[in-house]
Image (tube, helix red, strand yellow):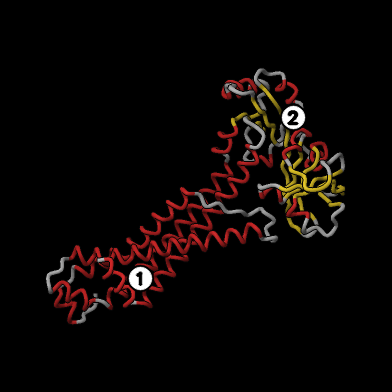
Amino acid sequence: MFILAIKALKANKLKTILIFISLIFSITSIFLISSISNGVISMYSNMLKSDGDIIITQAKISDTFFSNVDVKLLEKIDKLENVKKTSAIIVGASPVEKLPIVAVYGMSDNRFENYKLIKGTYPKLNEVLVGNSIYESLKNKNSIQIADKTFNVSGVFKSDIGFENGGVVLKLEDASKIFNKSASMLMVNSKIDSNIENLVKDIENLSKDIEVKSTQNFVDNYNQFKIIKTSSNLIGLISFCMGLLGIVSIMSITINQRKTEFGIKRAIGISTKKIVSQIILESSILGILSFISSFFISYIALALIKNSSLFHGYVNGEISSTLAIYLFICSLSMAILGSIIPAINASRIDPIILMQGDKI
């Protein structure tokens, strides 16, 4: 049956190519949308997980950009049992030269060691550390303006996290003046074998104005991540439906043109089940081939996006094994569902009518 399916695909080259292209466009679009959304979530998650078991934000805020936590709270947290290290971060954004928006990170001094220097030194007051991808695009490599203040460039760092590599880092005190807040988040590292849940409760008791979560819990329940995932799934569903509609249309035309073939098969005693199975096999072959093609196209496209100076590392796709398996199932489902309805309709019509050339 496999050989017959291959011969049938070759015999209808134009329709085969059209279905193949339709599948590739649909699957590639889902690949790219899902990969980029996963990449954005992964980058921000890794940045948060790099130095903290617990994250503290302002209570009842929708996003960390709006959070304002009193940095003096760190003094009380440091006194708690099982606390190993505490730090503070301010997260903001500002235009830099011709770039419309650049991530700006204000850091307490003990977080600077997270950034790998490739030249220069860590920043002092009125200085900034610049991500490698931003530094390469700067015309003035000695100083940059953030908001209404000019800062000297003390050094350049490189990070595997695109958000950081495409941003600037400065002292917490300087960022506090720019964004008019004490800290966006406080990070707490616990001692080995500490009970995180108990430590979270102890920190919550220090102030009624804060929200305290384990880093993993924060990442799992972060509102912006949920919005990104929901949007990605919705766009992916639209791509799936558009691809499915295209396949159904093309398969209906293809099967209509093959009505004499199916009529003869029915007349010589070939069952409806075998005819439908052959058509599904043909579509499945196309689904598998289109998935493989889409995978490599997406991989190349994501590599180009990641290394493009246009995006400065902010857009970075991630194709996980889970996503690949999910899209493989989607590819087969799209191909099979797109062919099964026209196939069943064709196989159920009387062979005499089919051979007479009546429309399906």
Local crowd at mark 2 within 10 Å, few (<14), some, or many (≥20)?
Answer: some
Estimate the spatial distance between the alpha carbons at disc 2 and disc 1, rounded to whole Å: 61 Å
* The residue positioned farthest toward the bottom in the image shown: 356
**77 in relation to 30, above or below:** above
Q: Mark 2 points at which residue?
A: 70
Tell me which corner region of the image, top left, top right, bottom left or bottom right, holds residue 23. Answer: bottom left
Q: Residue at x 33, y 75 (%)?
A: 10
Question: Which label was assigned to residue 148?
Answer: none
Image spot of residue 70 (x, y percent): 74, 29
Q: Nearer the viewer, residue 285 or 26?
A: 285
Q: In which quarter of the image is the N terminus?
A: bottom left
Q: What residue appears at the point 76 percent right and 40 percent down from the top-left corner?
A: 106
Q: Say few, some or many: other residues with alpha carbon within 10 Å of mark 1 (under 14 / 14 to 19 / 20 or more).
A: some
| Residue 232 horizontal side relative to residue 54, left or right | left
Is 70 or 105 nearer to us in this picture? 105
Rendered position, 18 above or below 155: below
**Residue 77 quadrant:** top right
Q: Which residue is drawn at 74% across and 43% down?
A: 116
Q: Position of residue 160 (x, y in %)?
A: 66, 48
The location of residue 277, given as percent across then percent down, is: 24, 63
In what element is the residue under mark 2? Answer: loop
Q: Mark 1 points at which residue?
A: 249
In-front residue for pair 248/274: 274
Q: Residue at x 79, y 37 (%)?
A: 172
Q: Which of marks 2 and 1 is nearer the N terminus?
A: 2
Q: Which amino acid does label 1 sit on?
A: Ser
For label 1, the SS is helix
Q: Position of residue 208 (x, y in %)?
A: 65, 24
